Image (cartoon, rainbow, N blue to C red):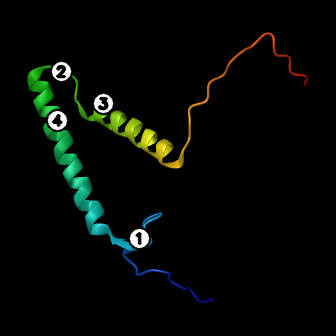
Amino acid sequence: MMVVHLHEPGRRQRPGSGHDEPTVYDGLRAVLLLLLTGIDALLTALIGIRPLAPALSRLGHVIADEYRAGRHGYVDAEVVDDPECEVEP
């Protein structure tokens, strides 16, 4: 049995990127995120409020969803119940 590697070992293919990205960047991004969430936890604990990271994460997801919907031309559908309109099953 022959094993064929489609990309270099130690590198991974990111979905949709079309090129390999070194895993070092993923590690650096994870360390930066860890430091930022730690700073957020310390500062908000000193002030006495909830950490901002979860709220900012949710906001980022909402913005990304709206951007993707707008980019692909999706519209929000509304369900209208009209008693005058009869639909046969």
Going from the N terminus, do you reach mark 2 or mark 4 first? 4
Relative height, residue 86 to residue 62 (above, below): above
Relative height, residue 89 to residue 41 (above, below): above
The reply to whether callout 3 and callout 1 are in contact (CB within 8 Å) is no
Q: Which residue is mark 4?
A: 40
Pair 2/3: label in front: 3
Q: Label 2, label 3: how many angstroms apart (C-alpha)?
A: 12 Å
The one nearer the camera, 2 or 56, is 56
The one nearer the camera, 28 or 64, is 64
Relative height, residue 55 to residue 70 (above, below): above
* Residue that lies at the very extreme toward the top in this rendered image: 83
| Rendering coords of residue 26 (x, y %) | 30, 61
Q: Label 3, label 1: how many angstroms apart (C-alpha)?
A: 30 Å
Going from the N terminus, do you reach mark 2 or mark 3 first? 2
Q: Which mark is residue 55?
A: 3
Q: Label 1, label 4: how many angstroms apart (C-alpha)?
A: 31 Å
Q: Which residue is mark 2?
A: 49
Image quarter for residue 50? top left
Pair 3/1: label in front: 3
Which residue lies at the image location 29% right of the left edge and 34% below the top edge?
56
